[in-house]
Structures are given as C-alpha cells and as structure tokens.
Amino acid sequence: MAVVGAFVYLAQSRFHWQYPLAEPILGTDFAIYMILIPLTAGALCVAEEKNWGVADWHTTLPPSSLKQWSAKMAVALSTSLVLGLLLPGALALAGSRLFGANEGAAIPPMYMVVAFVIGHLLLTSLVVYAASLSRNTVGAIILALGMLLIAGGLIKIVITIVLQVAMSFLQDGPHPFVFWWESHVSEGEIIRPISAGMLVLVCLLQLFAFVCYRRRVLKFGQLTLQVLVLVLAVCLLTLAFVT
C-alpha cells in the first residue's frame, strides 16, 4: 500500500490532480501499521503461550517469572516500537524528502517524539494486559479493542464534565487565569507531564499484566481492584490533559 501511495503521489504531482489521493492511501497505511503491530506483538507474546499449553510449563524453568516476563516484554515492546512507530515514521520522513512533499516541514520537537513513543508503548502494554487475561490471540485483541472503547468513553465523559464545569464558571467571560495560562504555558510544558502520566499508566499495565501472568487466575476482587485503579488513572490523566 505504501508503494502504491508513493506512485500515486508521483502521478498526482506530475498531472496536478485536483483531488489528492496519495495522502489518504499513505495515511491509512501508516495508521494500519501503528495499530496492527501493537495488537499482534502484544497479544502473541503472552496469549499464545496459554493457547499452546506451555505457560504453566515455563514456571519449571530455572529463570524466575520476573526474568521470563522481562525478556518477553523486551522483545514485544521493542518489536512493536520499531515496526509500528519508528520504521513508519522514518519512511514517512524519507518519503517526504525523496518526493519533495512538505519541504518546509520541520522534524517534530523531542518532547513530541517522546510522547508518541510512550503513547505507542501504552497501546502495546494495554494489549499485553488484555493478553494476560485471555486464552488466545483473537480473544486478547478483541478484549484490547473493548478496553480501548471503554477508555475512549471514559475520556469523553471526563472531557464533557470538565467543559460543563468550565462553562458554568466562565459565563461572564474568560477568567484572567485563562489569559495568563495561554500566554505563559507552552505546548512542551503541557506535553511533558502528560507523557509522564502515560508512562505511569504503562508501568501500571505492565505490573498488572505480570501479576496475571504469574498467578494465571485472578480472584474477582483482585481483578476488580486492577480495573478500578486503571479507570482512576485514565480519568486523572484525562483531567490533567484537559485542564
């Protein structure tokens, strides 16, 4: 699809097509890679062990469960990051230079790159957590997509509540604090704490996934506690981002 998009872009530039076709093709291609790779890499590294019946057998090996988990995550996270984010990003940058597109576009600042990397690791860790609760890869992917939908719903609810509260306080016009915030706080100062919050959420997901991997079966109370902690973390992160 990326090759097709590149040739379409060349034809589009040469014949001056009125409606751009290459950009949607390339954008869809990169979106598929950035979503599909975390889903497959995160699900395969844990769920397939249960499907093959070797997950319990691994506990008899000399390395501890923590060392085995660390090795799995090192491979899964690095594979997802390189193939799902760094490689598509490098190809997009190389393509823009090679085909002359976006010649004036600058490389994103480092804090944005770090935020994208942490966000990608967050998505992969979510799939890993779903895989630790599932018996096979398909079930892990479906559960991860369901978690993403629930997280999206929570984010929308928090944003709606914050906006409603803000409108009630700003009926007489913007508060002076709003002007001060817009004039003194830069984009980087907002993105950095958000990235730190996402990193904390990555650590929580990895911790809970390891607990599920080591114990195999969780009690209802333990699983409920994990869900409540994750819901609270998502709500707090969204609240920090909105405000």
Image: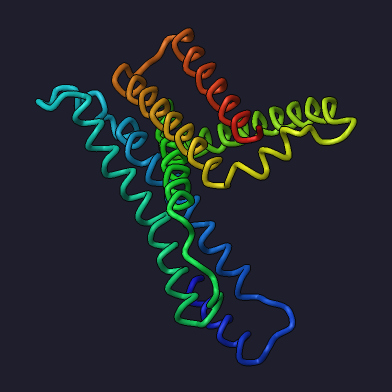
Residue extending furthest toward the bottom: 15
Q: Coloring scheme of the render?
A: rainbow
Q: Camera-side residue: 116 or 35?
A: 116
The reply, left or right, for residue 82 in relation to residue 68 is: right
Residue 195 to residue 61: above or below: below
Q: Position of residue 187 (x, y in %)?
A: 57, 47
> Which residue is rendered at x = 76% and y = 34% of the image?
176
Q: Position of residue 144 (x, y in %)?
A: 51, 35
Count of all numbered marks drawn on residues in the image: 0
Q: Position of residue 149 (x, y in %)?
A: 62, 35
Which quadrant: the C terminus?
A: top right
Residue 104 to residue 34: above or below: below
The reply, left or right, for residue 66 in relation to residue 133 is: left
Q: Camera-side residue: 78 or 104?
A: 104
Residue 180 in which image quadrant: top right
Residue extending furthest toward the left: 62
> Which residue is rendered at x = 60% and y = 25% of the image?
235
Residue 134 in which image quadrant: top left
Residue extending furthest toward the right: 172
Q: Position of residue 230 (x, y in %)?
A: 51, 23
The reply, left or right, for residue 26 in relation to residue 127 is: right
> Which residue is rendered at x = 45% and y = 29% of the image?
201
The reply, left or right, for residue 47 in relation to residue 161 is: left
Residue 39 to residue 158: above or below: below
> Which residue is rendered at x = 79% and y = 25% of the image?
165
